[in-house]
Every structure is written in C-alpha cells, then in structure tokens.
Image (cartoon, rainbow, N blue to C red):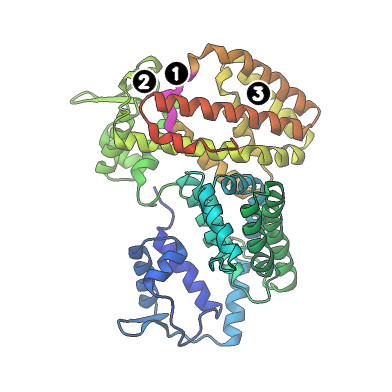
Amino acid sequence: MKGNMERYQVVYSVLKTHIQFGIYGFGDVLPSIENAAADFFVSVDTMRAAYQQLQRDGLVTISTNIGTTVVRNYGKEEIEQNIQMFYAQRKNILIDLSKSLRPLLGHAQWIGFKNIPAEIYGNLRQLEDSHSLPQTTTFEHVVRAYTALGNNLLFRLVWQIFMFCENPFFNMRDNPWRTFIIKDFLPRSWDCCIKQDWDCLRELVYASQDSLSLALCRFYDEKITMPPPEQEVAFQWNSYNKASQICYSLAMDLLVSINNGVYPADTLLPSLNKLSQEKQVSVSTVRRALSLLNGVGATKSAKRIGTRVLPSHEIVKNCDFKNPAVRKRLLDMAQSLQFLTLSCRDVAEGTIQALTEDGLQTCRKRLAALKNSQQYELIGYATLELLKCFAPYKAIRTVYKELLQLLFWGYSLKDIWKTDEGRIHYYLSCFEEFDLFLAEKDAAGFSMKLEELMAGEFHFTIEIMISQGIHEAKKLLVIGI
C-alpha cells in the first residue's frame, strides 16, 4: 500500500521548482527556516527536512552564518526548458484543477470569511482607519477563512492545491492572475470583510478562482509549446496528516469491504499473516488497523479465535467513543461531511448541467434502485456518489472519492441513523424531487435540494456525536450551514 508524498517532500518539490524557474537564482539566500515554515504553514522540522533535501540534491548549501544559499546556476535557456517541461507534464490536470476550484472551494471560502471572529474585523477596521493594515500574503488571508470553519481536513486539501497548482504559477513573471490577486482581490476582499459586504465578497471569491483558470489556459496557449507526455503528473490528495499513516488506509479498506458484504456479519476476517501478505504491509500495521476497527465497533477480536465482524445491532455498544483514535476518525468523518455540505450545491449544479441524456437516466435508475431496496437513509450519500462518478472534472472526482470514503468512519453511527424513523417521509420526498429534477434536467433545483438535504444530515450527525460525548464536533457548526 503506497502513500502519497510526505509534507516535507511537497515543500521540497515547490522550492526546487522555484530554483529551476529562476525565482531564486545563483547566490540568492532563501528565507530562514523559521520564516519559510511560517510562509508554507508547516513545522520548522518539516521545513528543515525540505532544505536538507535541497542540499543533498546539490541545489543549495546550508551555513550557520549565512543561511541557505542557492548554488545551482541555471541559464536562461535551461530555465525556459524547465518551465516548458514542468507545465507540459501537468497540462491537463492543472487546467482541470483550476476549473474545479470554484465548485469545490468557492462557497466554503465565502462561508469561512463570514465566520472569522468579529473582533478580528474590528481590529482590521481600526488599522484601516490609521492606514496601517498589516502586510500579508494572499494565502495567509485565504487561510484565515478556512481556519474559521474549524476543518483541518479542508485546510489540508487547500494546502495541497496551493502547493501543486497555485504557488508555482503565482510566482511566474508577467502573470495577470498574480496581478489581479495582489492589486484587486487582496485589498478589495479585506474591505469587504471589514464592511461585512458579503454579497460583494462572494462575487470576488468566485472571480479570483475564475481568473486563475482563465490565466492558466491563456498561459498554456501563449507560452507552452512542448507537447504533454503520454503519462502526465497526477494530482493526489492524502486526507491524513502523514502519508505514512497506512494503518488508517488499511482499516478503511477493510471497513469498506465489511460494508460491501465482502466480510459478512458474524464471519471472521483473515488472519494477521494473511492480511499482511494480501495488503503488503507489516503484521504490526495490520494489528493497529484491527485495533481501530474494534474501537469503532465494526469488529471484535478474541485470542485464539480471531476477529469477528459484528452485526449492526452490536456496533454502537461495542464502539469505544472515549478512545482518542476512534474520536479522531469520527471527527474526520464529520469534517468530510461539512466539506461535502459546503460544496455539494455548486458541484451538483455543474455535474447535472454536464450530464448527457444517458447519464441522467443512469442517475435516475440508481436512485430508483436504492429506493426500491428501502435504504431511504442513504439518499444523500448515494446522490453524492453520483457526483463522484459523473462530475465533469477529474479533480472533483478525486476529492469526492476521498471524502466519501472518510464517511465510513461513521460506521458505528449507522444504526442510530436507521432508527430515526421520523426522517423517512422526508427522504421519500427527496427521492421524488430528485427524480423530477433529473427528468427535467433542472440543475438548479436538484443542487438546492441536495444542499438542503445534506445540511440536515450534517446537523443530525453532529448532534449524534455530541450526544456520544464527542463535543469537539461543535466547532464544525458554523454560521451559513
């Protein structure tokens, strides 16, 4: 089981690109480790590891007295070749990702700005009146919005997108998007926040994301002449803090298999050694993964017997809601649900608009099959699954796949969802309305109804978590959802 790059490798890759593009030239001293760590929103240890990797690759030297100095000297032709190669290798995914930003993140960023504490805006107003607004980077400004949502998962995605797409392009010379962000978006969005002009701010947030896509497409048309290779660089997102935390990935893999009936209730999972061989991980990793599954109530292990898959009526009583690892995974689920709730309307509208007649009929058939199976409580999640399959941009499909998988950490709560019979009538009405919207290809109506449904699911889930003593989930209840 292979993980994505560790954070220091991502930072290293960005800095290496800066040197290859001539942003940092021969003899230039890079920012101190402490300042660079703050700029990249990583720990000092992560930043130090990135600098040390640059040194091992012969790109910089590190001196206690001078700092980190660039020693690789790229000529103009080499720099141009580096730029051509970098963007040729990422053409389709960068364009795809840039077009995904508005539906994925636009609404979330706007809601985040609205949830920044009032005292911060009050302080900004005083500074504005005294003409001493602090110097800040655009990313710092945007991070403030996402931080206000209390969602670390969402922040990690934003950080990954910034490193993969926005940072390298932002630093390109003669870049109209950079000019727009610095000269227009940053000061105007400050002003909108201070004045609480939310309608203006929403349009500005969307304009900044559209501007990136337009500028990037124009950049490719006018500047990049090298054809893309057959195998381009892919955008990857690891929803965990460290790619090395593969026990979570293994536990999730097993949890999905249990949910899909691969391992039925009251049967035993394969032995530690067999799972180790099948999944190509160590026995200790398998043991940690099974411990987590026991914690969420999906399984129960017994010496000399093995690990038994528990039936649904035994899950809640066997879930250890006081276990820190279990609580963290449930919070992962809640953060994923918040993000899906914030983005589903824009993603759904774009998806329904892009569907062919065959695609619309496929969606209707899948929802009808779910209704016939009487799994009414899954209507919202099945609809999100359709977005994962049919969204017009690969980046959205990639992110939604990860988000939907994280919802399986709520496995221990599913029996509670099913016992809430008062919601059945509402779910049935959603089936009818979704089918009508799909029949008429009413993207706006479909997306509004989905947002309403998921907002209800989100609040219901948070209430359940709080009732089980997971009070940390309260911070996800922000204004605007």
- Please state if 277 lies on the left or on the right of 15 as rendered: left
Circle 2 residues within 10 Å: few <14, some 14–19, many ≥20 = some
The local secondary structure at tag 3 comes to: helix
Kindly indicate whether the residue at mark 3 contacts the one at mark 1 (C-beta within 8 angstroms). Answer: no
Camera-side residue of 142 and 178: 142
Q: Earlier in the sequence, mark 1 or mark 3?
A: 3
Which of the two discs, 3 and 2, sits closer to the camera? 2
| CA separation in Å, label 1 and label 3 | 22 Å
The stretch of residues the image draws in magenta is: 409-417
Count the labels in the image.
Answer: 3
- Please state if 83 lies on the left or on the right of 271 as rendered: right
Image height of 86 relative to 416, above or below = below
Q: Which residue is mark 1?
A: 416
Q: Which residue is mark 3?
A: 367
Q: Residue at x 55, y 65 (%)?
A: 137
Q: Which residue is mark 2?
A: 316
Q: Position of residue 88 (x, y in %)?
A: 63, 68
Q: Which mark is residue 468?
A: none
Q: Earlier in the sequence, mark 1 or mark 2?
A: 2
Q: Residue at x 54, y 66 (%)?
A: 136
Residue type (three-letter) at the residue carrying disc 1: Ile
Magenta stretch holds residue 414:
yes
Magenta stretch holds residue 431:
no
